[in-house]
Image (tube, rainbow, N blue to C red):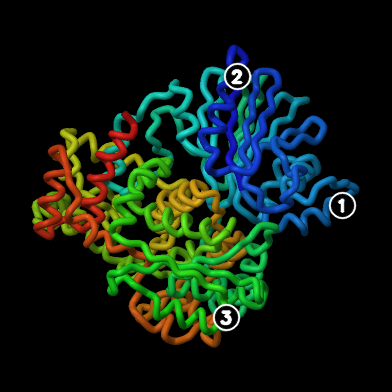
Amino acid sequence: MCRIAGIYDPSSQQLEDDIVIMRDAMKRGGPDDAGIYINQGLALGHRRLSIIDLSQKGHQPMIDNNLILCYNGEIYNYQIIKSELKELGHEFHTLTDSEVILKSFKEWGFACFERFNGMFALAIYDKEKHEITLARDHAGIKPLYYNWNEGKLYFSSEIRALNTLNIFNENPDWKIYFLAFGHLPEPITTLKEIAPLEKGTFLTINLQTGKTQKVKFSNFKFTSEIKSVNEAKILIRKTLIDAVERHLISDATIGLFLSGGIDSSLLTILSEPILKDKLRTLSIVFKEDKFSEKKFQDIIIGKTGTKHQTFLVSHEDFIESLPDVMEAMDQPTIDGINTYFISKYAKKAGLTAVLSGLGADELFGGYNSFANANRANFAKNIPDIFLNLFQKMPKDKFKKVAYLRFKNLTGEYLFNRGILGTNEISYLLGEKESKIIHLLKLIHTSEDGQSLNGFNKASHLEQHYYMQNQLLKDSDCMGMWHAVEVRVPFLDKELIKLAYRISPEVKFCQKQKKFLLINSFINELPREIWDRPKQGFAFPFSEWLGDMPVRGKAAIHAKEQFQKGRYTWGRYWSILLMGEWTKKSN
């Protein structure tokens, strides 16, 4: 797990200085080693967090004859691929998955990316062809931002690295997207000229001719071919157990975040036979009892015998840590603080990698949006003139109904998960509402989910908006800020493929969230864990934010609305955070 950066600018007189500045802006995510490669106007930079093969043989950029690799991630099936490559005559000199990537590219070219089961963002430079290829994993777990324009290329794992060059302009509209979504949806970033490479995609650029080729190598489609509950349960058991085993491969210390919910409890239970006495877990608790899940954590601790550590986070810790939280954020997000603290304490516990339950809710129906999936279809039939009236409702959660005017997936997502309505954003930012509506309508997912219905549409929305743009970004930037790799077994490529093959009638039950996942492991999961309302890993922000001092028109307005009960803490926090981010940027 690492951080990568690159520049192609044959006219630059300070290429080495610039790549070192970019690379070291991300040193928190790669404290173990650093390297650069420079050739023919191309500079590659790498910071390393050692997970597999902790020796210097894993140094990057890694060179294999005419191929040079700069890579961030983990390929969990690298040992299987390595065996296949050995049979084809390839020799290996390290124990790393990095070398497997290089040999795979040499053997299969671009087709190698389809073979990888893992999380990755990488650049491979072919010195002979003077061609560079950027690629990002099937689920977009690892970030990769880039700009290719007028024969110059810039890319990195974090926006902060690109910011250090002072050559890119701030996106003047980022606040509109942030106040609507609570994050910046792809392809939006805070820099006008910078966008993420799409997940499951590779981009090849011939640096001599400027010719480019962008290809999507991974795209999941719902097929509903598995219609038997028993068949689905058997397949889920095997596929998830195999995924957990793959994700526990590590030469560094690995553990699990145990919240006490279904997903983290299940991962802990499935990890116990593999790690045995090396099983380590950690959790966060609060003084505020209604937010504590300690009694559920204790059930799993007792069942598995894990070596567990509990960390208390208080209101005072939150206030004291806020400046560092803001520094850790690579892009503004309302939901990164929980990951910040769990990663901080994972590092304190001596862990280099942790398993997270992220992805289970999105694939198997853990959110209210699944039960409410058909509400949007009904409401979309309401004439726009009446939908507009919802913006005059006193509570903002009712104002979001007006997003259904968009008549697209973005409108449906914002109807369920939007933060502020368009007229409220207009008031706070002093922008015309017509402009706000126009910009938000342009956001769409890379896959076409408009034809989907019910469960599958809800799954599509949760994966391609909320999970993609918020949860995965937060896990990556906050984990790496503390030099901790966050692994997500529920987003294992084989498990996603399987989930997409199962009929929604089999996956979904109106009376029980994650019905199929729970019933696949009903003999392992204690009833107390699954037979209770979903709590989620939530901090006591509603109680912590009330006495925060505020300045400026937007923040004062937001505090008044929060105190009157018209804003949830998330809406209030989004406006406070927007102000903090603006101060940070200036």
Q: Is residue 254 visible?
A: yes
Q: Quadrant of residue 66?
A: top right
**Type of amino acid at the residue the image marks with label 2:** Leu
**Type of amino acid at the residue the image marks with label 3:** Gly
Say whether disc 1 or disc 2 marks the residue closer to the N-terminus. Answer: 2
Distance from disc 1 to disc 2, alpha carbons, whole Å, reads: 38 Å
Q: Secondary structure at mark 1?
A: helix
Q: Quadrant of residue 187?
A: top left
- Quick check: 519 above or below 423? below
- Residue 96 place in picture, x, y as percent: 75, 49
Q: Give the left or right position of residue 181, taking residue 121 as reference.
A: left
Distance from disc 3 to disc 2, alpha carbons, whole Å, reads: 53 Å
Front in this rendered view, residue 455 or 398: 398
**Type of amino acid at the residue the image marks with label 1:** Lys
Q: Mark 2 = which residue?
A: 15
- Residue 478 place in picture, x, y as percent: 46, 50
- Quick check: 183 above or below 275? above
Q: Mark 1 = which residue?
A: 86
Q: Nearer the viewer, mark 3 or mark 1?
A: 3
Q: Secondary structure at mark 3?
A: loop
Say whether disc 3 or disc 1 marks the residue closer to the N-terminus. Answer: 1
Q: Are marks 1 and 2 in contact (CB under 8 Å)?
A: no
Front in this rendered view, residue 482 or 241: 482
